[in-house]
Image (tube, rainbow, N blue to C red):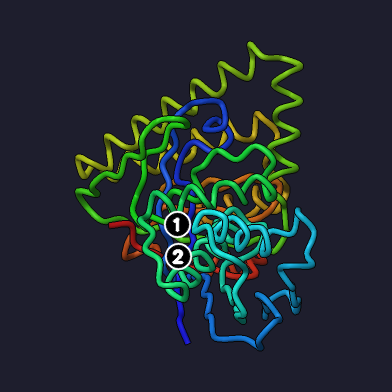
Amino acid sequence: MITATTPGKVILFGEHAVVYGRPAIAVPVTQVRATASIAEGRAGNGTTILSTDLARVVHVRDAPADEPLAAIVRAALAHFNMPDPDANITVHSTIPIAGGMGSGAAVSASIVRALAQFLGRDLDAAAVSALVYEVEKLHHGTPSGIDNTVVVYARPVFFVRSQPVQTFSVRRPFTIVIGDTGVKSPTKIAVGDVRRAWEADRDRFEALFDRIGSIAGRARAAIETGEVERLGPLMDDNHALLREIDVSSDALERFVRAAKEAGASGAKLVGGGRGGNMIALADEKTREPVERALRAAGAKGAWVTSVE
């Protein structure tokens, strides 16, 4: 049995604007992970994928072209120039689905890595990320590329579309609390809505994206210099701009208020919005009160993670 695991992720700053060429910052979240295990299958059956979370069995040779689990296997096999092997792949993930935490990308990355080991092939992070990005198009329509980059490299990333990956150092670790609204919100839908709004009023949205991109740049400088106390207000500003582009929701607003009232120095939605997850900046004194406040506000899950 061969097993590969990949962490989830959250975007700290820059979601949506990153699709339009502005920078974003994202970090891995190791408290949640996707795991793929692979073993020899019955001769002649080809590759079969069991998703324990979705209670689905996918036979790669029979699956439609837009089936993501099959698509990542096909993409990997095409990259290796190898035929469909007789193999059973079992996938399990603790990453919330459609919550802005990179669930689809992490599952795809784990499958690619497990399959590569099973076939005795070497793949570097750049190759894994490129393969996962192709399948991300099925999940998101017009993906920024940030999900596959962060979960594969498992390091803080300063990401600008169509530019080389920039990992960077965290001068002083800081703590974020993640709250899950429990509302599934496929990124593809929110991204499509924002694109239609951008097409209808490009000047306004370009100005909003510029402001979001500027926040991401200032946040990177604060993280690299260890001035993490600057991040809270920047989160608040970023969230206000995301609210202006209409990707917040009643649940997200409730969670942001609850986190702030419990002592968080900043809070914002993450990912596509309209549901999914939010984050709050906390410290040793406020991390537990913020987590309790989010659960009291109705969070289906809450995680505390250190960015370092």
**Badge 2: few (under 14), some or many (20 or more) residues near its Cα, within 10 Å?**
many
Q: Name the element at disc 1.
A: helix
| Mark 2 / mark 1, whichever is N-terminal | 2
Judging depth in this view, the residue of 82 and 155 nearest the camera is 82
Quarter of the image for residue 95 reads bottom right
Spot occupied by residue 172 in the image (x, y as percentages of width and height):
21, 52
Judging depth in this view, the residue of 85 and 194 nearest the camera is 85
Q: Name the element at disc 2.
A: strand
Q: Is residue 291 shown left or right of residue 16?
A: left
Spot occupied by residue 9 in the image (x, y as percentages of width and height):
47, 56
Q: Judge whether 228 appears above or below 65 on screen.
A: above
- Asked if one can make out residue 223 in the rendered structure from this viewpoint, the answer is yes
Quarter of the image for residue 192 reads top right
Mark 1, residue position: 151
Cβ–Cβ under 8 Å for marks 2 and 1: yes
The three-letter code of the residue at mark 1 reads Val
Q: Is residue 31 shown left or right of residue 227?
A: right
Name the residue rendered at 53%, 57% in the picture: 81
The three-letter code of the residue at mark 2 reads Pro
Q: Judge whether 227 appears above or below 195 on screen.
A: below
Judging depth in this view, the residue of 293 and 192 nearest the camera is 192
